Amino acid sequence: MSGNVVELTQALVRMESVNPAYDPASPGTPPVIDFVAHWGAEHGFEVERHPVQGGLENLVLRLSNGPGRHLLFNGHLDTVSVVGMEGDPFGAAIRDGKLWGRGSCDMKGPVAAMLIAAQRLAQERESWSGTLTLGFTPDEEVATAGIRALIGQIARPDAAIVGEPTLLKPLRGCKGNIRFAFRCHGKAAHSSRPEQGRNAVVAMARAILALNDYFADVLGAIQRPQFGPSTGSVGIVQGGSGINIVPDECAIQVDIRLIPGQDPEATLADLKAMLRERFPDGDGYRWSFELLHLDVAFEIAQDHPFTEAVKTLTGTEEAQVAFFCCDASKIAAIGVPCLILGPGDIAQAHTAAEFIALDQLEAGVETYVALARDFFA
């Protein structure tokens, strides 16, 4: 057994840290930050806490061991909602060789593996030299405020690993996104006289069809090997207040996925221009656009020395890419070679029965230790 990685994962899962954007009653990450900070101090790490907007904190644990290169291990401590989960989402039960509960896979298991790996390295200082920083953030699941602050709060690392669950195979890039709300404001009327109103739901239906064509014709033409095309999806539709009322408002929320090399600002400008042209104010309708989130994509070359080293260490012939977004893109955006690598399977993330396999946790510790030793050699 590699230290107490299973017990540490259980302790982390048992602390609720649902992002308050999903559940305003959740305590969020502060209790987990407190726990990990205490753990770090107990095990001899330099401990720093840095403010993040909204009253949150980033946590930095640092292991300095003489001159050498600087490696960052990054993980997030917030989780998505527990609504609809099977069993106790914070029970951290062990069954069938798996540890169950919200965050077990995404990504408290990987965080625990990083911590135990760092503890091992602290006990083996004679075998390496350099600086290992562990940076743990809040708000990855919603606005990525934590990582955006963290990159300015620590010394620039020479390379970074983001511990999203990848079955311990390195991913060399991920997609970005643009998320926005589009609203139609019409005019209410009694449903027996619909001609006296302006039906915002019907107008929005036309906008949804126009967006679907844009996704296929415009975004679909923007492609990159392994990543495939840029894509778009209408995820939320809200409109109407009663079956006998012509709806005066309808809103949608849209998720655009960006690929490396695609200019987010140019894509956003083109999208807004299309909507303004196709759906101008007038004839009793008014339209509004609200940008909710913008996140860049990133890619590190297949033959980059860091990629090659981690591929060799993990027995990976070709590093794949992620279609999801994560904190790695913000680290890569400041020019730091970055890979996504962690125990667990992303297919379990955000599910009603989230789990992480115990053998993945154990292998995660060994992989992180071996990676750090190789990097600092």
Image (spheres, rainbow, N blue to C red):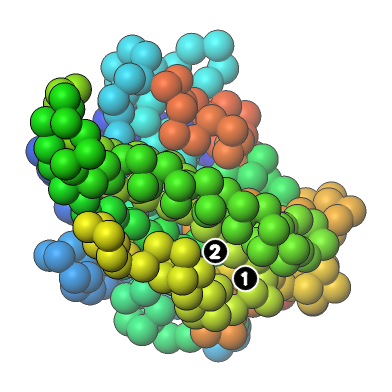
Q: Mark 1 points at which residue?
A: 298
State which quadrant residue 350 falls in.
top left
**N-term mark: 1 or 2:** 2
Image-based side of 332 in relation to 354, left or right: right
* Quadrant of the rendering where the N terminus is positioned: top right
Compared to residue 246, the image places residue 65 above or below, namely: below
- Residue 366, position as x, y percentages in the image: 64, 47
- Residue 19, position as x, y percentages in the image: 25, 46
State which quadrant residue 174 falls in.
bottom right
Q: What element carries label 1?
A: strand
Q: What residue type is labelled 2?
A: Gly
Q: Which residue is drawn at 78% across and 73% down?
A: 301
Counting other residues with Cα less than 10 Å from the Cα at mark 2, is it few (<14), some (14-19), or many (20 or more)? Answer: many
Report the disc number at residue 4.
Answer: none
Image-based side of 305 in relation to 321, left or right: right
Q: Mark 2 points at which residue?
A: 176
Q: Residue at x 45, y 20 (%)?
A: 353
Image-based side of 243 in relation to 309, left or right: left
State which quadrant residue 290 falls in.
bottom left
Q: What residue type is labelled 1?
A: Phe
Name the foreground residue: 293 vs 66: 293
Compared to residue 372, the image places residue 240 above or below, namely: above
Circles 1 and 2: CB distance less than 8 Å? yes
